[in-house]
Image (spheres, rainbow, N blue to C red):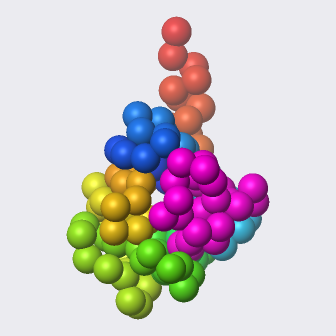
Amino acid sequence: MVRMIFRHLSGSRATEIDVVAVGAHRELILGRASSAAVRFDARRDKNVGRHHARISWTDDDPTRFSLTDLGSRNGTYVNGRRVAEPVVLKRGDMVELGASGPKIEFDWEHRSFIGALEERAQP
């Protein structure tokens, strides 16, 4: 099982962590919309669009994540650089939604089914 980890470093959700399992869907949305997988506060995170950015992957490599800005007004930044084309995310990359918007650290973990069962069996 592959899980994405989003550590909120600033914005209304600073100090919070989202963990999202890579499942049957091929993408997840970051934004203020209620349908977004990683959701931001509409009143306090004003730089974030309803559907601000998308992270996608493929079955061929579920640990290769690509971030795309969805035409947001304030832009999406990875490690301080504005995203114009899809960008492959690496562990520890800093994603910022808007030049002074919320900043999150991106990470992921891969746990095999056997490893998860062994972990549960531990006393």
32, above or below 10, in the image: below
In the image: residue 37, left or right of residue 99: right
Is residue 37 a member of the stretch shown in magenta?
yes
Which percent across, then down, holds residue 104? 39, 53
**Which residue is more in the foreground, 42 or 57?**
42
23, above or below 13, in the image: below
Q: Quadrant of residue 29?
A: bottom right
In the image: residue 49, left or right of residue 98: right
The residue lying at 41 percent from left, 68 percent from top is 98
Q: Quadrant of residue 25?
A: bottom right
Residue that protrudes farthest toward the left in the picture: 80
3, above or below 93, in the image: above
Q: Quadrant of residue 53?
A: bottom right
* Residues shaded magenta: 31-54
The residue lying at 43 percent from left, 65 percent from top is 97
Is the stretch drawn in magenta largely helix, strand or loop?
A: loop
**Which residue is more in the foreground, 94 or 34?**
34
Which percent across, then down, holds residue 38? 59, 54
The residue lying at 40 percent from left, 34 percent from top is 15
**Which residue is more in the foreground, 51 or 114?**
51
Q: Is residue 111 visible?
A: no
The residue lying at 53 percent from left, 43 percent from top is 18
Which percent across, then down, holds residue 56? 56, 74
39, above or below 79, in the image: above
Which percent across, then down, holds residue 118? 53, 28
